[in-house]
Amino acid sequence: MSNTNEAVVSPPRRRDTLNERHVWQVYARRKYDEPLHEIGNVMADDVELAKVYARSIYDEFSWIEMVLIPRETIVTVIGT
């Protein structure tokens, strides 16, 4: 018989297990004369891991430049 006072513990989510809590916005360009475009984001705790994730996830083009911006540093100028 089950004890009704036992707490039900759910398994940790994958992101909690990996402890990746920082979101990095990824911007890139394919030609020198075009502006940087947001191409997505990655989750990683440090910049070195974020670089690895960005390069491996967004490798569909030959980028000439790719940059990462920590999401928490983005400042909204106009918005809700």
Image (tube, helix red, strand yellow):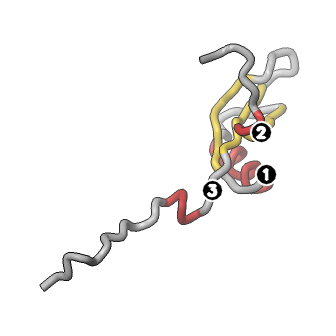
Q: Residue 9 occupies which quadrant of the picture? A: bottom left
Secondary structure category for the residue under label 2: strand
Q: Which residue is mark 3?
A: 20
Res 1 label = none
Q: CA distance from mark 3 to mark 1?
A: 11 Å
Q: Residue 42 occupies which quadrant of the picture? A: top right
Residue at left offset 66%, top offset 39%: 58
Residue 74 coordinates in the image, percent (x, y): 75, 31
Quarter of the image with the C terminus is top right
- Identified by mark 3, the residue type is Glu
Mark 1 and 2 residues: CB-CB less than 8 Å, in contact? yes
Q: Outermost residue, left direction?
A: 1
Q: Which residue is mark 2?
A: 68
Residue at left offset 28%, top offset 77%: 6
Residue at left offset 69%, top offset 27%: 38
Residue 2 coordinates in the image, percent (x, y): 17, 82
Q: Outermost residue, right direction?
A: 32
Would residue 33 be found to the left or right of residue 24 on screen?
right
- First-in-chain label (1 vs 2): 1
Residue 5, placed above or below residue 37: below
Residue 73 coordinates in the image, percent (x, y): 77, 36
Q: Which residue is mark 1?
A: 47
Nearest to the observer: residue 72 or residue 7: 7
Q: CA distance from mark 1 to mark 2?
A: 8 Å
- First-in-chain label (3 vs 1): 3
- Identified by mark 2, the residue type is Leu
